Image (cartoon, rainbow, N blue to C red):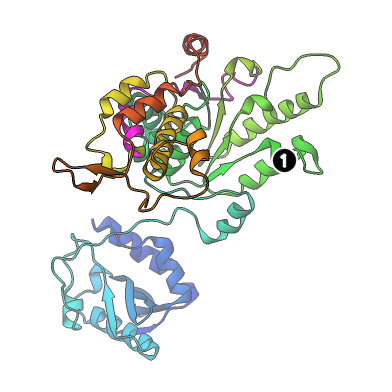
């Protein structure tokens, strides 16, 4: 058998490294580092090759990170083992990296890899009780500039879980949208084509924007909101600016694109001669099929008035689903109230009463009532009574000793500091003074639209 030797990696060795990487997989061991990472380090970092005659029989590839070196690939042909090739490769890669001033050389091996003698012989220690964690960065550096120009952003990962209640809607969105988009290979096995465009409809303030952001958060895709009102001032006109924006979005690898109040640019086309807005509607109808041809993206349109949308806009082939988002259910209202009741008084406030008193309220209505109660409680704590005539009577001064916390009298007459925040009665007072955004008539129309227009 010819003698072996170790030399530096050459570009012509790329196919041999690929062969070694694939062979390690067929041996039942999944490499820790992806092939793309290994090949990139071959070219840019440190790599040595073991050859026997003219045949490549082993490779070691490493990169430096601060004062530590990481071996990202280490493999030897099965037929060439037990000849000291592994120890030779490790010694060579260490000598190549020594001038970098490294204090440590490490490598990660799959649990199923049992052939680690060369590492042990080379002085590597097997560190017990360590676990390896990793996650992919969802937006690559080269996309950040474009994303910034589009006004897009990567949303926090917790938004999906932060949507309290609304389990029926969340489960529907998880199954219909998130599952096939997050697992396209699995969807393909079952013949499922991942959705490309959906419409969320419902009364004002029901959380359609919140759900759109939560979907982007759940997928870990950039969220890009398109504002037609801002594009209208573009010299190219609204239609031209809309077309240009979607061309730029197509350069992103992934994106959730959101258009709120889409009825403003996709209303029923009628009248002679055609209005300028009809040209915008026509342009949007052309954009959607082209958008659908690109994988890894989702268009979410939201509307408060689905009956106003052009009939051609909603047809099959443009939107996969037309999903109703209604008023928050009891569980959702409970979660919303928990968000707004201060922690200091949370144990003393009867949330069940607040939840029952806000049946028919939108999330925005609940927020308004909660903030109204908090404001009144603050004014009472500072001025002794809410704003208005009483506030004017006190002038601009603050009573002596008033520091924002109300005082109460204990059983023995001692003044004690009360918990800071509204009481149940103050919340109920604010609820009674809040007019629900969604009237009974609008709620009835929404139920009719669910039966007539929704597509789930």
Give the answer, above or below, for where 77 lies relative to 125. Answer: above
Q: Nearer the viewer, residue 287 or 326?
A: 326
Residue to which mark 1 is pinned: 231
Q: Position of residue 322 (x, y in %)?
A: 51, 21
Which region of the structure is painted magenta? 312-339
Q: Nearer the viewer, residue 107 or 422?
A: 422
Q: Is residue 87 left or right of residue 235?
A: left
Residue 197, image quadrant:
top right
Find out whether residue 318 is within the magenta segment: yes
Point 40% across, 67% down: residue: 38
What is the quadrant of the N terminus in the image? bottom left
For the question of whether residue 306 can be seen, the reply is: yes
Residue 363, image quadrant:
top left
Give the answer, above or below, for where 334 lies relative to 14. Answer: above
What is the quadrant of the C terminus in the image? top left
Point 35% across, 53% down: residue: 401
Point 23% across, 82% down: residue: 87
Q: Is residue 292 left or right of residue 51?
A: right
Q: Nearer the viewer, residue 412 or 246?
A: 412
Q: Position of residue 78 (x, y in %)?
A: 23, 68
Disc 1 residue crowd, few under 14, some 14–19, many 20+, Cα 10 Å: some
């Amino acid at each position: 058998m010819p003698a072996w030797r170790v030399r530096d990696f050459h570009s012509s060795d790329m196919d041999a490294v690929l062969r070694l990487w694939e062979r390690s997989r067929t041996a039942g061991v999944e490499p820790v580092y992806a092939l793309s990472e290994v090949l990139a380090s071959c070219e840019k970092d440190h790599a040595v090759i073991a050859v026997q005659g003219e045949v490549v029989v082993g490779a070691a590839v490493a990169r430096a990170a601060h004062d530590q070196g990481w071996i990202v690939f280490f493999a030897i042909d099965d037929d060439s083992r037990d000849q000291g090739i592994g120890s030779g490769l490790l010694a060579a890669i260490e000598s190549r990296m020594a001038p970098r001033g490294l204090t440590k050389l490490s490598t990660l091996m799959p649990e199923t890899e049992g052939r680690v003698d060369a590492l042990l012989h080379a002085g590597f220690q097997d560190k017990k009780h360590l676990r390896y964690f990793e996650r992919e960065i969802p937006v690559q550096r080269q996309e950040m500039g474009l994303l910034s120009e589009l006004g897009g952003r990567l949303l926090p990962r917790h938004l999906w879980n932060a949507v309290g209640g609304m389990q029926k809607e969340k489960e529907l969105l998880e199954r219909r949208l998130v599952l096939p988009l997050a697992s396209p290979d699995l969807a393909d096995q079952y013949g499922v084509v991942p959705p490309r465009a959906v419409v969320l409809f419902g009364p004002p303030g029901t959380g359609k924007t919140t759900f759109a952001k939560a979907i982007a958060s759940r997928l870990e895709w950039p969220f890009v909101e398109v504002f037609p009102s801002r594009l209208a001032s573009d010299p190219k006109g609204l239609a031209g600016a809309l077309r240009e924006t979607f061309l730029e979005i197509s350069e992103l690898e992934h994106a959730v694109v959101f258009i709120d109040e889409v009825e403003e640019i996709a209303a029923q086309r009628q009248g002679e001669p055609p209005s300028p807005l009809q040209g915008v509607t026509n342009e949007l109808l052309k954009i959607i099929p082209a958008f659908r041809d690109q994988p890894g993206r989702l268009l979410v349109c939201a509307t408060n008035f689905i009956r106003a949308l052009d009939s051609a806009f909603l047809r099959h082939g443009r939107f996969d689903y037309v999903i109703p988002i209604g008023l928050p259910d009891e569980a959702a209202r409970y979660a919303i109230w928990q968000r707004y009741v201060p922690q200091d008084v949370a144990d003393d406030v009867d949330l069940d009463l607040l939840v029952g008193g806000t049946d028919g309220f939108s999330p925005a209505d609940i927020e308004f009532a909660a903030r109204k109660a908090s404001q009144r409680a603050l004014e009472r704590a500072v001025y002794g009574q809410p704003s208005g005539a009483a506030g004017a009577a006190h002038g601009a001064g603050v009573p002596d000793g008033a520091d924002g916390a109300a005082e109460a009298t204990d059983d023995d007459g001692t003044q004690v500091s009360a918990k800071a925040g509204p009481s149940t009665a103050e919340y109920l007072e604010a609820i009674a003074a809040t007019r629900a955004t969604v009237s009974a008539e609008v709620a009835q129309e929404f139920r009719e639209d669910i039966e007539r227009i929704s597509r789930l």
